[in-house]
Image (cartoon, rainbow, N blue to C red):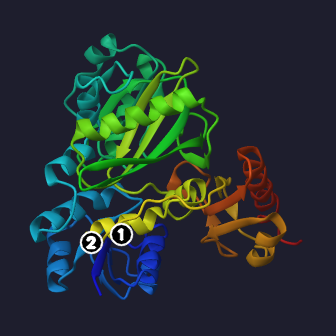
Amino acid sequence: MKKVLIIGAGFLQDFVICKANSMGYETYAVDADPDAVGFKHAHHHGVINIVDDHACLEYAKRNSIDGVLTAATDYGVLTASYIAQKMGLPGLKYEVAKLIKNKYKVRKCLFENQVDDTEQAYEIDGYTNLEELSCRLLYPVMVKPCDGSGSRGASRVDISAQLKAACQYAMKNSITHRAEIESFIDGKEYGAESLVINGKICVLGIMQKWMTKPPYYAELGHSIPTDLTTEVEEKATRYVYNAIKALGINHGSVNMDMLITKEGKIHIIDIGARMGGNMIGPCIIPYGTGIDYMGAMIQNAVADPIDLKSDEYTAVATKLLAFKEGIVQYLPDIEQFEKRFGVEVYHHMKVGMQINEYHTNLDGCGYIVARADTQEKAIKKAENALNYFRNTIFLRTR
């Protein structure tokens, strides 16, 4: 039985742990949270901060693991790469992992290789002369941490007077206290999920996305198929492939976000060298493409044979359980709820729990997943279920 180490054991990593268990692998997990949900399902676990690559490496060596991976968090990417390199396991090259962690260096690489249609990008830190830079910027712009995960620290700036506060906010959410400024693109957001196997790039799917309105930029849901024309979706697939190639990503999952304008211009806005979050691995890719994505990802980590054949698939739509601030007063019987609305529900809410207003993915309470024969029907099912939650969970009585 091969041993797989999963870096991170939170709500979304737990799906990977359970999948590896079902495939017959012996699972090991590390996380700084002693109460991480994944620890309940992993065969073995260690309470270790996932950014402490040396401590995680010692744990991996001590247990003679055969493969290592992370999922749904950017903070485990460097550690997984470091362990793979030090132990001679399949993995992303460490220098590439470091590159991917820096959003500005990624943007610079994409620009130099003419991968997409973005034109303006700058890197800043606490010593940058923002007044001077502001004179060169073409507004509006997006400001975001150079090394953040997801939407945390990102904001739109429309005038120079807003720039300083946005940069401070982004740097506060950056481990290295650095931020990137790039052109704000007026377009709709889409995602892409890929898997690199022995250097071969496999773009698994393009996903439609829904986002919160400014000033926050957080995901609200995904769907496959998208509303793109075949021509534009094929172009997006080429851009994703070329971006992975230009960055030198040699192994593992790649999650990508892009903005696509009405004119069909494509702007890659974020890249993570790991499986995407928000149910992309457990539901969106396998339901929407028929590919056993998490299974292939785990097999890739331990150099086992991989079959990317596509089985039956349907339209799929997800909606985050994203609410305004409040205290949960009521929860339905989830099994009965799923039958009533024809959906799947994954959540971590409890009666009496304080809910924060949804600004970033960390404020989310879970997910609704709906399947149907068309995108429109899947979206409608998910929205109906979400609206029921919104209208009932904060009420004391039913």
Residue at 70% in and 58% down: 371
Q: Say which quadrant the C terminus sits in.
A: bottom right
Q: Vertical placement of 224 versus 106: above or below?
A: below
Q: Residues within 10 Å of mark 2 (few under 14, many from 20)?
A: many
Q: Are marks 2 and 1 in contact (CB under 8 Å)?
A: yes
Nearest to the observer: residue 227 or residue 170 = 227
Tell me residue 320's x, y (percent). Answer: 63, 55
Residue found at the far right of this picture: 398
Q: Which residue is mark 1?
A: 298
- Any part of residue 169 in sight: no
Residue at 19% in and 47% down: 96
Residue at 46% in and 29% down: 235
Nearest to the observer: residue 157 or residue 281 = 281
Tell me residue 29's x, y (percent). Answer: 33, 78
- The numbered disc on residue 24 is none
Nearest to the observer: residue 159 or residue 331 = 331
- Any part of residue 358 in sight: yes
Cα gap from disc 2 to disc 1, whole angstroms: 7 Å
Residue found at the far top of this picture: 135
Q: Which residue is mark 2?
A: 302
Q: Vertical placement of 345 versus 163: above or below?
A: below
Residue at 77% in and 64% down: 394
Tell me residue 25's x, y (percent). Answer: 35, 83
Q: Is residue 13 left or right of residue 325?
A: left
Residue 240 is drawn in which quadrant? Answer: top left
Mark 1: amino acid: Ile
Q: Is residue 260 left or right of residue 308?
A: right
Q: Vertical placement of 260 versus 252: above or below?
A: above
Q: Vertical placement of 21 versus 71: above or below?
A: below
Nearest to the observer: residue 353 or residue 37 = 37
